[in-house]
Image (cartoon, rainbow, N blue to C red):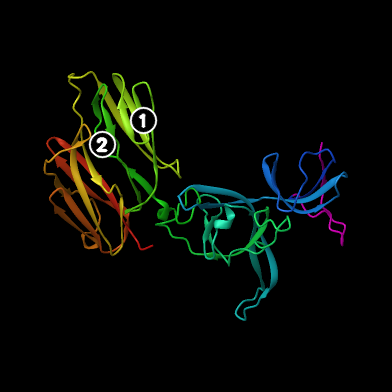
Amino acid sequence: MVRIDPVVNYNTGIQVGADYKVFIFPPSFPVEPYYGMKFKWGRNYYLVTNVDGKPGFSNSAEVRRCNNVLRFFDKNGNKIYEPCILDQVLRFTNNNDTMTVVTGKAELYVWCQRNKRTLTLKPNDRILFGHKGQRVGFRLYASGFGNYINTVTGDDSSPSLTQFYIEEYEMNKELDDLENGFANAGKYEYSIDISENSTVFDVGTEYVLNATVYKGKDLANEKVIWRSEDNKIVSIKDNKLTALKEGTVKVYAIMRDNKCVYGSLNIVVQNEGASATTRYDILIKPDINYVLERETLTVNVYLYKNGIRQDDEIEVKDVSVDVPRCNYILQPGTNSFTITNKKKYMDKPLRVQCSAKDIVKVFDFTLRGLY
């Protein structure tokens, strides 16, 4: 059992507030509380801001409720959700001779646990807070106060608390994910292209699978893990596929360090000599759906038959609607086209129609602003 008491201001004798608690742990409690400890009680997370006690006796811990969440990306584009305390301190008045009301100037700051996730936050990183539809952007000062304070002497990796001072800052509607509350989401757009793989095999066939990882429009040196949905039909070791028995199965290429980034193929395994259904598709490479302002994107486009690239020439046509022609240049080529973004336009996408034989496919591209 743990006893929970309110926190009382020693100077006034007034209870501080519902966000402040004192947890009193019995000597038999399996975990001794420590400064920077994070735990969940009920529906909320709490951070320990002070401890008092001795081994063999009851231990008390002053805690504060985490009233918000830091949302940011790691280097591989994984979404990180770190419970935090968002607070402010009124330091001095902000007087303005033209105003009849004296307003206060507050310092905003964030308390969070120092751990391997929050240690990746850097000066000037932007963080979004607020409800969906009312997001507000903030910028971090420095790299956090308290990062040099350890809870265990000599142990630099011991948990502790970090305090970030923040200021309200601009948001970037082209880069920020305002729906989910992540700043700079556009900089972490990883994708996997696995289009140049065969999709129909005879039983007993072995085949080496290929995948290309992109970060934005640039090649990314990231590892890929291949998985088969049914190892009885198709088995995969590293990137080598073996067709075992007749059937249809989906295989996945998954980015090793970010499982949310993946591509998939439908594989058909047939008995040797059997006629398989012919499947056509038009695919582009790189598979990217935006062009930055003042940049030119070159896109290769090919017809594929059962996952095998064909030599048919692709007809490229601009089918955009209500996108100002003065904002871009679309230049068709032989099995390729280029898009030059002369001026940002986010209201509607540029639409490029690609066709060969009886196959028609339309690709959308957003004319984004500069990073």
Q: Is residue 8 magenta?
A: yes
| Residue at x-position 28% and y-position 51% | 365
Type of amino acid at the residue the image marks with label 2: Asn
Q: Which residue is mark 2?
A: 197
Look at the picture and state if 100 lies above or below 362.
below
Residues rendered magenta in the picture:
1-18
**As rendered, which of 244 and 322 lies closer to the eye?**
244
Compare marks 2 and 1 and give the one earlier in the sequence: 2
Q: Residues within 10 Å of mark 2 (few under 14, many from 20)?
A: some
**As rendered, which of 101 and 351 lies closer to the eye?**
351
**Which quadrant would residue 272 be assigned to in this image?**
top left
> Which element carries disc 2, helix, strand or loop?
loop
Look at the picture and state if 139 lies above or below 299.
below
Q: Which mark is residue 48?
A: none
Q: Which residue is mark 1?
A: 236
Q: Is residue 331 magenta?
A: no
Q: Residues within 10 Å of mark 1 (few under 14, many from 20)?
A: some
Tell me how far mark 2 sits from mark 1, CA to CA: 14 Å
Whether residue 85 appears in this view of the structure is no
Lateral position of residue 252 relative to residue 33, left or right: left
Q: Position of residue 180 (x, y in %)?
A: 49, 48
**Which quadrant would residue 209 be assigned to in this image?**
top left
> Which element carries disc 1, helix, strand or loop?
strand
